[in-house]
Image (tube, grey):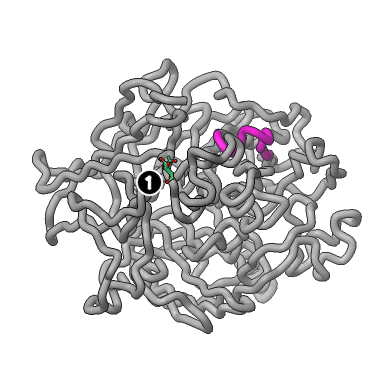
């Protein structure tokens, strides 16, 4: 009896990561979940790593960030990449104390996909919902929106430097429970693009010099191989890959999160295992089975795969598109059956921008291709509650514009049209307006002056051809609002994910009228 109690205790503690809120969700068990986020400037392959990556066993040491075996500075929460996962149950109270240990920079954390009803001031957007954090700050909110999502820095380029992590809110009663057998805490896969310089170098090199904005590689839960080693002339180290362990005969729920900072949609597929998509962006859908899907930055897909193939190791493949295409950014995680050898799958792992044979969900720049499904084709589980008529409609045209952006040019000394082609960079804008942060957060200081404010339909202030303001779209409480998002197609076949804090979208239509007009 004593033995079995001890054994039970061991099993429970090894399955959970250690946080008391990481637990199976049951009706009535509502907890307060406390976390400490210590943010600091840090380094991959630092002191904690001893002889990693030459000595691979050292890569698993506490506080060692091995990443892809390449040394670079980063920003880390609790000396982890990704930062700590928050996995709770619907209705739990999440309390996160953020200690900003940076030398001089401020911080805010956004809880993506949490609508923050009644906790708007914890949404984490600097100068919009709060003053940025200098010392320490407590976020305190209810996990009211179930589903797979993530938290990330909303300050500067910090998300690209490593400040993000999973945020999963499970339910005691899951309408999709029939579709899978296992929903394990470790089966959350956070994808990210990764650079071998800092994001500051990349961003400044792109905007103020002639460098590119391409990613170097992809990481899965902070792990992977340097797939750009050949381009860079670097040695590849066999640092650990992410592995998903499965027992034959069972169905596994995998939670995919794309935390990429650059414009890197990622094609995801699993060798010999079709994926049944059961939720997208925290919303359950009528299950659909596809061979691959494209996940854009900020998006999440919950998929189910059935371990019904011969015992072995199979690649979970990630192939980057757009800004991840130039350096052939790809990565592999391993789907490992119980009883399989501890080795890599035999199939080659190479970059491909092609969709694998079969059906692809959410393809890039396509709306009605053969074997292609868009999110308009995905049926929501919840009945459609959208009213037939809308109260307000906003037209939001977006594009890159050829203008004398004062942050990049000086129309007296080096205007747009007088610099050579390699120095020309176009300015991304919405309705031909660039965003300016308010001087103080309107949420906490509504009476403070907003000198740069301009409202939808009004003409903003411009310097020459460069217009910028704090652009405000006003709605009344309870109104149904329709956004018409139009890629104006001036320059290139650009694509971009859209995300609205505090709300979910119902996608009612999608279309494509043609290709871009100017090259
Ligand atoms: C930028 O400024 C220059 C100098 O004032 C002007 O000639 C030019 O038309 C402006 N616009 C662009 C796109 O260069």
Q: Is residue 381 left or right of residue 20?
A: left
In front: 313, or 78? 78
When the figure is inspected, residue 382 is found, relative to residue 107, above or below; the finding is above
View extreme (front): residue: 412
Secondary structure under the numbered disc 1 in the rendered image: strand
Q: Is residue 259 magenta?
A: no
Which segment did they paint magenta? Answer: 322-331
Q: Is residue 330 magenta?
A: yes
Label 1 sits on residue: 429
Q: Is residue 274 left or right of residue 227?
A: left
For the question of whether residue 240 can be seen, the reply is: yes
When the figure is inspected, residue 480 is found, relative to residue 442, above or below; the finding is above
Count of numbered circles in the view: 1
Q: Is residue 267 left or right of residue 65?
A: left
| Residue at figure coordinates x 58%, y 23% from the top left | 354
Picture coordinates of residue 31, whole percent (x, y): 41, 75
| Residue at figure coordinates x 53%, y 37% from the top left | 305
Picture coordinates of residue 506, whole percent (x, y): 26, 42
Question: For residue 455, which quarter of the picture?
Answer: bottom left
In front: 141, or 172? 141
Picture coordinates of residue 164, whole percent (x, y): 55, 61
| Residue at figure coordinates x 35%, y 34% from the top left | 487
Picture coordinates of residue 232, whole percent (x, y): 80, 41
């Amino acid at each position: 009896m004593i033995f079995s109690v001890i054994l039970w205790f061991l099993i429970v503690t090894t399955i959970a990561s250690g946080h008391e809120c990481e637990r199976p969700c049951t009706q009535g068990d509502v907890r307060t979940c406390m976390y400490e986020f210590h943010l600091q400037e840090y380094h991959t392959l630092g002191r904690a790593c001893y002889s990693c990556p030459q000595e691979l066993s050292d890569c698993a040491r506490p506080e060692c960030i091995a990443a892809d075996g390449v040394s670079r500075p980063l920003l880390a929460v609790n000396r982890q990449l990704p930062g700590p996962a928050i996995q709770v149950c619907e209705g739990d109270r999440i309390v996160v104390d953020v200690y900003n240990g940076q030398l001089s920079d401020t911080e805010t954390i956004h809880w993506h996909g949490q609508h923050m009803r009644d906790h708007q001031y914890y949404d984490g957007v600097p100068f919009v919902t709060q003053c940025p954090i200098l010392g320490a700050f407590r976020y305190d909110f209810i996990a009211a929106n179930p589903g797979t999502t993530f938290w990330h820095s909303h300050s500067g380029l910090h998300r690209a430097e490593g400040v993000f992590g999973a945020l999963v809110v499970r339910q005691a009663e899951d309408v999709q429970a029939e579709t899978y057998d296992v929903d394990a805490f470790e089966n959350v896969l956070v994808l990210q693009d990764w650079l071998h310089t800092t994001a500051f170098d990349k961003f400044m090199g792109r905007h103020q010099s002639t460098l590119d904005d391409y990613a170097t590689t992809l990481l899965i839960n902070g792990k992977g191989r340097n797939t750009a080693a050949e381009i860079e002339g670097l040695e590849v180290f066999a640092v650990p890959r992410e592995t998903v362990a499965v027992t034959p005969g069972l169905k596994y729920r995998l939670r995919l999160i794309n935390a990429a900072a650059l414009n890197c949609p990622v094609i995801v597929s699993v060798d010999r295992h079709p994926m049944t998509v059961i939720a997208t962006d925290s919303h359950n859908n009528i299950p659909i089975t596809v061979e691959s899907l494209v996940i854009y930055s900020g998006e999440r897909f919950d998929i189910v795969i059935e371990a019904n193939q011969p015992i072995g190791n199979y690649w979970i493949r990630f192939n980057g598109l757009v800004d991840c295409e130039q350096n052939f950014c790809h990565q592999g995680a391993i789907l490992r059956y119980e009883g399989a050898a501890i080795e890599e799958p035999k199939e080659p792992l190479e970059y491909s921008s092609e969709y694998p044979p079969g059906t692809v969900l959410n393809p890039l720049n396509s709306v009605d291709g053969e074997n292609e499904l868009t999110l308009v084709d995905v049926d929501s589980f919840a009945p459609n509650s959208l009213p037939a008529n809308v109260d307000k409609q906003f037209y939001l045209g977006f594009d890159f514009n050829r203008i004398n952006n004062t942050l990049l040019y000086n129309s007296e000394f080096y205007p747009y049209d007088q610099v050579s082609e390699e120095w020309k960079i176009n300015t991304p804008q919405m309705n031909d307006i660039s965003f300016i942060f308010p001087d103080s957060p309107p949420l906490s200081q509504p009476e403070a002056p907003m000198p740069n404010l301009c409202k939808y339909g009004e003409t903003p202030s411009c310097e020459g051809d460069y217009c910028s303001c704090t652009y405000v779209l006003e709605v009344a409480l309870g109104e149904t609002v329709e956004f018409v998002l139009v890629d104006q197609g001036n320059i290139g076949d650009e694509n971009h994910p859209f995300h609205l804090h505090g709300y979910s979208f119902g996608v009612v239509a999608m279309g494509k009228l043609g290709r871009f007009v100017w090259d």
